[in-house]
């Protein structure tokens, strides 16, 4: 329990923050400290989480020469210096390599190592997130979140000060409520220190998604739940909790906290309003969850055993020592609302017009007469000119549509096969009929940006923003700048992913 004076100080700080609208009046971790439950880990690529913090928020590595730089707030307690990242990453790709811990304990998050569930790459390590996949603004200032595609994950298996055993802790995260799936498991929080499933109760992490393999909430999801290992819990049991609502907010505040035989889930619209309690009560009665056996590692975007099939977007989050009061969490929610998270453009470069017919010409020196086309379902490049057959001209022409998975980006419908779109599948580009599924819509959504080689556009996948339209041996892929696949080769990458967009042939 906390003294009245601690709660009062927390509320005063929160009221001051709301009154001033300032990001530096009191950071979330200042509020947790005032409430008697200090942060032992504080992660954010968008802003400082302490009013006095001016250190590094995250590190990025660029593809052109593999050098790194750290991104700090514009000022103490402020928003990340996105312009510094944009300058460093100009005309190349960038990955987020480290998410720094602002608490001073050194609980940084780095590329997750292999675990019980093998990683996506040949060495078992998870992928790193694109540095540009999740642009937002805070109080009108641009920043970038962490866009987690399946196969991407961060971890710290040697964290300091995290709860172990049945010790009390709290945590919150600000997430994208529209970016999720049913894979296991998009988590942020406490997990096993050996990256393996070591049994019930060995985790306590925030989960966000629409998996129904264990627990669920009302409606069809997504839901905020708790990953307690071998179960996603929405309430007392690994079943349905009608009090855990489906989320429809663009920005979501998700909170989980636990102490001996007591835990809670809370959530809110991160852009307005107050936190609601979705569950508060005793631990599940199934063996292993009371008492808990938390181990104290920290994960982001993955399950405790390195399960990597989930997706989501993370903007900020903390873990605390002790069980935060509702009043403290309410003050933190007021701080998040005052930060004014908002969407911003996902595209750049030469503009596209929905409804127009376009062609995409390769810019690599070998191939400047070749255009993106298709033969049946296979996307490839072919030599096309004004004297080409009508059929070939149609195969090399695409109708621009609003993005099926995100209307801030685009989808490309085949001119000669109405209702079929370019989509990626196993990183190959295909032309398939729109089946109306969420998966198809996301696979068929792409976000153009200024061409990496200075010509035209480069077109990145919305759902895998490290990957771009690329021609390799005249076949179309979504490729990353270096990787385990032959089509990820770094040689001529910028040229191969840059396309001059013109009026369609048909």
Image (cartoon, grey):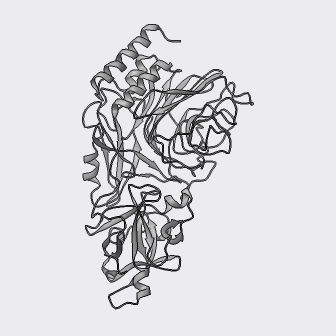
| Displayed quadrant of residue 79 | top left
Relative to 343, residue 459 above or below: below
Quarter of the image for the C terminus: give it.
Answer: bottom left
Residue plotted at (63% across, 43% down): 196
Residue at the top extreme of this rendering: 4
Across and down, in percent, residue 451 comes to: 30, 65
Q: Inspect this view and state whether residue 464 appears.
A: yes
Give the x, y percent position of residue 211. 62, 45
Q: Residue at x 43, y 76 (%)?
A: 415
Question: Which residue appears at 38% of the width and 13% of the height?
Answer: 9
Looking at the image, which is closer to me, 248 or 102?
248
Does the rendering let one see residue 122?
A: no
When the figure is inspected, residue 496 is found, relative to residue 68, above or below; the finding is below
> Residue 90 or 234: which is nearer the viewer?
234
Q: Is residue 222 left or right of residue 86?
A: right
The residue drawn where x is 33% and y is 69% is: 498
Residue 260 appears left or right of 4: right
Name the side, left or right, on which 234 lies relative to 503.
Answer: right
Which of these two is toward me, 339 or 105? 339
**In this rendering, is residue 238 above or below 467?**
above
Decide which of 160, 138 is in the foreground and name it: 138
Q: How many marks?
A: 0
Q: Position of residue 68 (x, y in %)?
A: 33, 50
Residue 448 lies in quadrant: bottom left
Q: Position of residue 461 (x, y in %)?
A: 43, 61
């Amino acid at each position: 329990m906390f003294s009245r004076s601690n709660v009062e100080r927390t509320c005063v700080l929160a009221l001051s923050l709301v009154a001033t609208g300032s990001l530096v009046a009191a950071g979330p971790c200042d509020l947790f400290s005032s409430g008697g439950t200090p942060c032992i880990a504080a992660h954010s690529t968008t802003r400082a989480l302490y009013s006095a913090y001016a250190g590094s928020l995250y590190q990025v590595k660029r593809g052109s020469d593999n050098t790194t730089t750290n991104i700090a707030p514009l000022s103490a307690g402020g928003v990340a210096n996105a312009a510094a990242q944009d300058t460093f990453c100009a005309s190349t790709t960038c990955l987020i390599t480290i998410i720094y811990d602002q608490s001073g304990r050194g609980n940084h998050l780095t590329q997750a190592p292999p675990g019980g569930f093998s990683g996506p790459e040949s060495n078992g390590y998870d992928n790193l997130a694109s540095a540009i996949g999740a642009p937002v603004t805070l109080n009108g200032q641009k920043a970038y979140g962490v866009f987690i595609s399946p196969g991407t994950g961060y971890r710290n298996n040697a964290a300091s000060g995290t709860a172990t055993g049945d010790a009390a802790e709290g945590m919150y995260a600000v997430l994208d409520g529209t970016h999720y799936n049913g894979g296991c498991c998009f988590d942020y929080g406490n997990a096993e220190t050996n990256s393996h499933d070591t049994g019930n109760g060995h985790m306590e992490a925030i989960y966000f998604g629409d998996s129904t393999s264990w627990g669920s909430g009302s409606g069809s999801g997504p839901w905020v739940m708790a990953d307690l290992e071998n179960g996603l819990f929405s309430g007392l049991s690994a079943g349905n909790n009608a009090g855990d609502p489906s989320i429809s907010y663009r920005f979501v505040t998700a909170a989980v906290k636990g102490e001996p035989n007591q835990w809670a889930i809370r959530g809110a619209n991160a852009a307005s309003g107050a936190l609601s309690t979705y569950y508060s009560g005793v631990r599940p009665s199934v063996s292993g969850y009371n008492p808990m056996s938390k181990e104290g590692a920290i994960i982001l975007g993955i399950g405790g055993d390195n399960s990597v099939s989930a997706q989501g977007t993370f903007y900020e989050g903390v873990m605390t020592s002790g069980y935060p009061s509702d009043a403290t969490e309410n003050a933190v929610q007021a701080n998040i609302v005052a930060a004014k998270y908002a969407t911003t453009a996902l595209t750049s470069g030469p503009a596209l017009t929905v409804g127009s017919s376009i062609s995409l010409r390769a810019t690599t020196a070998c191939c400047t007469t070749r255009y993106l086309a298709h033969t049946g379902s296979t996307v490839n490049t072919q030599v096309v000119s004004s004297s080409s057959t009508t059929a070939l001209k149609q195969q090399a022409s695409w109708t621009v549509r609003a993005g099926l998975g995100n209307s801030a980006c685009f989808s490309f419908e085949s001119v000669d096969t109405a209702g079929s779109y370019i989509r990626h599948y196993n990183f190959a580009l295909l032309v398939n009929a729109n089946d109306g599924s969420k998966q198809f819509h996301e696979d068929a959504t792409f976000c153009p940006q200024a061409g990496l080689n200075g010509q035209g556009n480069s077109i990145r996948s919305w759902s895998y923003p490290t990957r771009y339209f690329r021609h390799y041996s005249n076949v179309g892929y979504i490729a990353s700048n270096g990787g385990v696949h032959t089509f990820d080769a770094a040689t001529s990458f910028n040229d191969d992913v840059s396309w001059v967009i013109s009026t369609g042939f048909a």
